[in-house]
Amino acid sequence: MAKVWLVGAGPGPADLMTVRAVRVLAAADIVFHDALIGDDVLALAPNAEKVAVGKRCGAHSTSQRFINKRLADAARKYRNVVRLKGGDPMLFGRAQEEIDALAAEGIGVEVIPGVTAALAAAAGVQRSLTKRGVARSVAFVTPRVGDGEDPVEWAAAAARADTTAIYMGAGDAVAVASALVSQGVSPATPIALIENASRPDQTVHAGVLAALPALAAARGNGPALIVIGEICRDLASDEAALPIARRANG
């Protein structure tokens, strides 16, 4: 029986993937991929059957239980099975559910990490998530919870960190801003909303926490990450910090 490879596709550009990821894709027989995986990345698996199993907010998506079953069935049929995930599989990618489901079927798994959105966003705007004397802690959080899941105290964790990267929060910007303020985060805290991080159409909207709903309303339809903390101060006015972005002050 084959093993399943959980592969991180990174934030979008194919040349940000690891050498190991490219090698595994080249040998793949079948690839189960997320919705945001680009054609240039899928082209790295020229001989593989491609199966879209992605999840997008507000759109029809494949249930996780069904994905788990498809992966197990494929591992019994094919030699090289790839589950291709945007960003890094081990961060907000439900990888543990797939690993556990495959392990229960006696199917081995190997994980290949990828560049997660927060790191791509930091690189894209040339702002380190950590900075000596300013930011010594970073939190990766999401306000998103699945159906039937209990709410999590993400805002409390965000309030304690010097820098916070919020995944899947732009669509709930009003609630996100309110939750952070309720935890003691100042409405004047610098923020940046980075859309399509690392891609040619990357867009940056920068301001303060109180303006987050307006900044989110100005974004397009691409995946967006919210970064909060002093490392974002003066980002909107610093042209040199946005080398590939369509510059926007929100």
Image (spheres, rainbow, N blue to C red):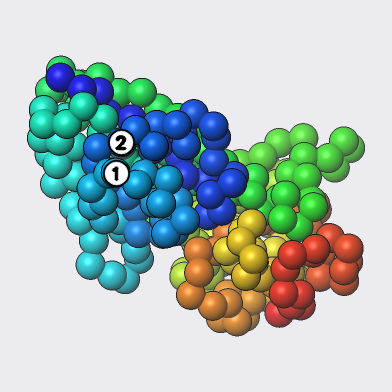
The residue that label 1 is drawn on is 47
Write down the quadrant of residue 45 in the picture: top left
Along the line of sight, the residue nearer the viewer: 241 or 139: 241
Residue at 83% over, 40% down: 131
Write down the quadrant of residue 247 in the picture: bottom right
Give the quadrant of the C terminus: bottom right
Q: Identity of the amino acid at label 2?
A: Ala
Q: Report the Cα–Cα distance between label 1 and label 2.
A: 7 Å
Residue at 67% over, 40% down: 138
- Residue 60 located left or right of residue 136: left
Give the quadrant of the N terminus: top left
Dot 1 falls on a residue whose secondary structure is loop
- Residue 61 located left or right of residue 201: left
Write down the quadrant of residue 237 in the picture: bottom right
Q: Dot 2 surroundings within 10 Å: few (below 14), some, or many (20 or more)?
A: many
Residue at 35% over, 66% down: 57
The residue that label 2 is drawn on is 28
Q: Position of residue 122 (x, y in %)?
A: 71, 50
State yes or no: discs 1 and 2 in contact (Cβ < 8 Å): yes
One can see residue 154 in this view: no
Dot 2 falls on a residue whose secondary structure is loop
Task: Please report whichever mark, 1 or 2, sits nearer to the chain's N-terminal start.
Answer: 2
Q: Identity of the amino acid at label 1?
A: Asn
Disc sitting over residue 8 in the figure:
none
